[in-house]
Image (tube, rainbow, N blue to C red):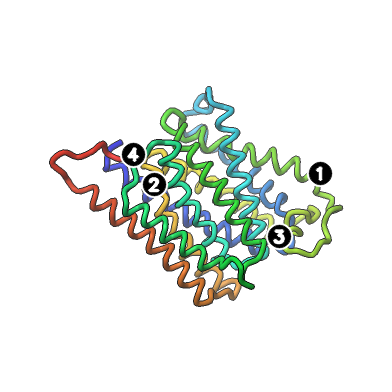
Amino acid sequence: MGQTKTPIGALWALLASLTFSVNDMLIKFLSDGYALHQIVFTRSLTGVLLLMIVIVPLTGGYGALRTQKLGLHLIRALFVVAANLFFYMALADLPLAIVVAIFFIAPFLITIFSVIFLGETVGKWRWLAVVVGLIGVLLIVRPGTEAFTLTTILPALAALCYAAFHILTRKIGQTETLISLTFYVPLVFLAVTTVIGLTLGQGGFAGGGHPSVEFLLRAWQWPSWADLSIMVFIGVGVTVGGAAISQAYRVAEAALVAPFEYTGLIYATAFGYLLFAEWPDSYEWAGMSLVLISGLVTVWRERVNARPRVAPPNSPR
């Protein structure tokens, strides 16, 4: 895929990052009053309706949903469902910026997985960026200290599932349509949250007291019209963001798109401070800075590699 595709992939990733950051903030806002599966069910229902009524008819019709890789679509969707549930459970207990920062081992995992599973080429500078970024995450998590809690494992698990999701996106994205990549994700979300709601929605397992567990096990309740509007808005946002990030990974190499998702850390810090009075400590600032620097190094090296050469290698993505 030509180098001219790289900026397009970056723009799609930036749009997705902003959209997902707003959604994260809104879900954290709702996390102390509603069940996680209720919020995700509402947003997924909104997303499916939006896709079926508006987006699918405008982007090739229902025939574009046909696929001979349904199994891979469903596995891919299950990975992102798991990533979301782990991530949002962490939001109920940890500051927004910290959850996002820990989650940003995902781009590093994507870089590693893209080499192992997709055969993509990653140079020494990008490997160095991966190492620096992981050091940054360790500064934030600080295993073995009082700052470390079991809840910090949740965004790490989310990152692992998210990386697997995007590697599958890259694997099938060259033959599948954008609308098919987008459609099956909210559909599986809807199915999974329906099952969770039917089994846990009465709140019979709630009452343990831990914010993350309570968020998952809390009973369903009818939301106020204002909160219902927020849930619907989240559904619209996640549909737009899902389409944008799928497109980013379709038109550009996985190891190059990933750094542009780091902007979510900036949004999370701002939202956390302005809306939840959360402010990182010095270790967390240092760790987040290393994560951002690692992303900038990766972008810089890609710009260097994009310069004309006498005998250029195969163009990335």
Residue 238, image x and y in percent?
A: 55, 49
* Mark 4 burial class by Cα count in 10 Å: few <14, some 14-19, many 20+: many
Q: Residue furthest top?
A: 68
Residue 124, compared with residue 74, is above or below; it is: below
Looking at the rendered structure, the kind of residue marked 4 is: Arg
- Is the C-beta separation of discs 1 and 4 under 8 Å? no
Looking at the rendered structure, the kind of residue marked 1 is: Thr
Residue 46, image x and y in percent?
A: 63, 45
Residue that label 1 marks: 199
Q: Label 1, label 3: how many angstroms apart (C-alpha)?
A: 18 Å
- Is the C-beta separation of discs 1 and 3 under 8 Å? no
Q: Label 1, label 4: how many angstroms apart (C-alpha)?
A: 43 Å
The numbered mark, 3 or 4, whose residue comes first in the sequence reads 3
The numbered mark at residue 255 is 2
User: Judging from the image, what secondary structure is the residue with disc 3 in?
Assistant: helix
Where residue 92 sits, quadrant-wise, is bottom right
Q: Is residue 49 visible?
A: no
Residue 101, compared with residue 303, is above or below; it is: below
User: Judging from the image, what secondary structure is the residue with disc 4 in?
Assistant: loop
Is residue 309 toward the left or the right of residue 97 in the image? left
Taking the spot 69% from the left edge, 38% from the top edge, the residue there is 191
User: Judging from the image, what secondary structure is the residue with disc 2 in?
Assistant: helix
Q: Label 3, label 2: how many angstroms apart (C-alpha)?
A: 31 Å
Taking the spot 86% from the left edge, 53% from the top edge, the residue there is 204
Residue that label 3 marks: 212
User: Judging from the image, what secondary structure is the residue with disc 1 in?
Assistant: helix
Residue 194, image x and y in percent?
A: 74, 41
The numbered mark, 1 or 3, whose residue comes first in the sequence reads 1
Looking at the rendered structure, the kind of residue marked 3 is: Ser
* Mark 2 burial class by Cα count in 10 Å: few <14, some 14-19, many 20+: many
Is residue 49 toward the left or the right of residue 131 in the image? right
